[in-house]
Image (cartoon, rainbow, N blue to C red):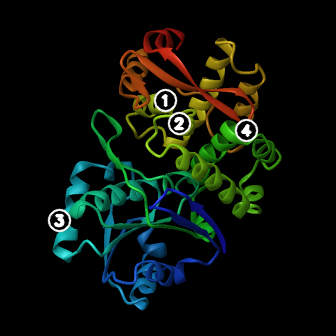
């Protein structure tokens, strides 16, 4: 077992990383929450047939009354209608303040179930069990939970930390290559923003099989970086903004594809390359970095660019949560393994794009 702690005073929680962990998930949760009676297990239509029974049985064996709620797989489930359905389902299940919600799945399930847990009864305990690479290295840690609105992604949400994060790397073996690649965009991001040695490691292991041979190291490194950043800036007003490297433009690319043509990982990959190019134009980013990032994302089958109209750029930048008034904190690299928040006027950024 590899254990990390997210050291938020009074709300500390552990991240457990272990192959074969799922059958023992209930025991870990019971040790943490001895008074809880009911566990609402939220998963999706892809994950439920693979791991739903294993986790539900583990919870039952640990003494929980379990009900499983399955949402359709895909970004479309991160919506107000599904959130309302979960609220009603939890109420009918008889969930109380001492009970818990377990999110079993990728980022969509973690965000949706997390927001439901944060808001039902003004907050019940949340356990994250991420089953995709993207969720394991990024979205399950840090407490950002949200749903999408027609106007954009993650516009309604909360900061709500889980009580425990359980990661079983074996779940990654069932991921399609494209879904694994999505997660690699976030993995690459961590090397870009905070760990040059890790960035070099990724360049030396440019394939899924090479990454999986060192997957515990990869998960531990990404979660360590995120835990450190979140502990310093939980509410995303300072240093935590660096975790959004590639995301300002990535969200524009997702919008350009109507949130269906391009995945989040594809948008972030192209966004990181474009952000590096902007940083070079601004005299901040070393000239070689855009090419280095492009080669790395290409090695994992991710795009280096995505067509985007001025209107989609303007819409995404207007909704960017790092913005204040007419200015924006654009996350750029000033050297490999180090990111900074660069203040820029939205009009200037749009003109450059």
Q: Percent x, y for residue 194?
A: 68, 40
Q: Contact (CB < 8 A) between labels 4 and 1? A: no
Query: First in sequence: mark 2 or mark 4?
Result: 2
Residue 289 in the image: above or below residue 136: above
Residue 144 in the image: above or below residue 319: below
Residue at horizontal 23%, vertical 60%?
Answer: 122
> Residue under circle 3?
88
> Which is more toward the observer, 82 or 123?
123
For residue 248, which numbered disc appears in the image? 1
For residue 296, which numbered disc appears in the image? 4
- Which quadrant would residue 186 be assigned to in this image? top right
Helix, strand or loop for disc 3: helix
Query: First in sequence: mark 3 or mark 2?
Result: 3
Residue 147 visible within the image: no
Query: First in sequence: mark 4 or mark 3?
Result: 3
Binning the other alpha carbons within 10 Å of mark 2 as few (below 14), some (14 to 19) or many (20 upward) gives many
Between the residue at mark 4 and the residue at mark 1, the CA separation in whole angstroms equals 20 Å
Between the residue at mark 3 and the residue at mark 1, the CA separation in whole angstroms equals 34 Å
Q: Percent x, y for residue 289?
A: 74, 26
Binning the other alpha carbons within 10 Å of mark 4 as few (below 14), some (14 to 19) or many (20 upward) gives many
> Residue under circle 2?
244
Between the residue at mark 3 and the residue at mark 2, the CA separation in whole angstroms equals 33 Å
């Amino acid at each position: 077992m590899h254990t990390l702690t997210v050291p938020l005073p009074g709300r500390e929680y552990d991240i457990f990383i272990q192959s074969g962990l799922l059958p023992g998930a209930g025991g870990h949760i019971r040790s943490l929450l001895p008074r809880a009676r009911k566990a609402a297990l939220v998963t999706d239509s892809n994950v439920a047939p693979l791991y739903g029974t294993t986790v539900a049985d583990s919870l039952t064996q640990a003494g929980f009354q379990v009900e499983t709620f399955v949402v359709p797989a895909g970004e479309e489930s991160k919506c107000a209608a599904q959130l309302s359905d979960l609220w009603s389902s939890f109420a009918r299940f008889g969930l109380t303040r001492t009970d818990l919600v377990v999110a079993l799945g990728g980022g969509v399930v973690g965000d949706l179930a997390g927001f439901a847990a944060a808001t039902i009864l003004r907050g019940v305990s949340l356990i994250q069990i991420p089953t995709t690479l993207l969720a394991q290295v990024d979205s399950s840690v840090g407490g950002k939970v949200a749903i999408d609105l027609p106007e954009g992604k993650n516009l309604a949400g909360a900061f709500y930390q889980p009580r425990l994060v359980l990661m079983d790397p074996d779940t990654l073996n069932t991921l399609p290559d494209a879904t694994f690649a999505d997660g690699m965009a976030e993995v690459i991001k961590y090397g870009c923003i905070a760990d040059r040695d890790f960035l070099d490691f990724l360049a030396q292991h440019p394939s899924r099989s090479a990454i999986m041979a060192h997957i515990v190291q990869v998960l531990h490194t990404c979660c360590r970086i995120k835990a450190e950043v979140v502990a310093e800036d939980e509410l995303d007003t300072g240093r935590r903004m660096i975790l959004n490297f590639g995301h300002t433009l990535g969200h524009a690319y997702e919008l350009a594809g109507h949130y269906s043509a391009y995945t989040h990982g594809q948008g972030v990959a192209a966004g990181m390359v474009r952000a590096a190019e902007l940083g070079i134009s601004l005299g901040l980013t070393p000239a070689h970095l855009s090419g280095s990032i492009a080669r790395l994302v290409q090695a994992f089958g991710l795009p280096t660019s995505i067509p985007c109209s001025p209107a989609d750029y303007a819409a995404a930048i207007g909704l960017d949560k790092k913005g204040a008034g007419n200015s924006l904190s654009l996350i750029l690299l000033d050297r490999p393994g180090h990111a900074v928040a660069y203040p820029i006027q939205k009009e200037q950024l749009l003109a450059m794009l």
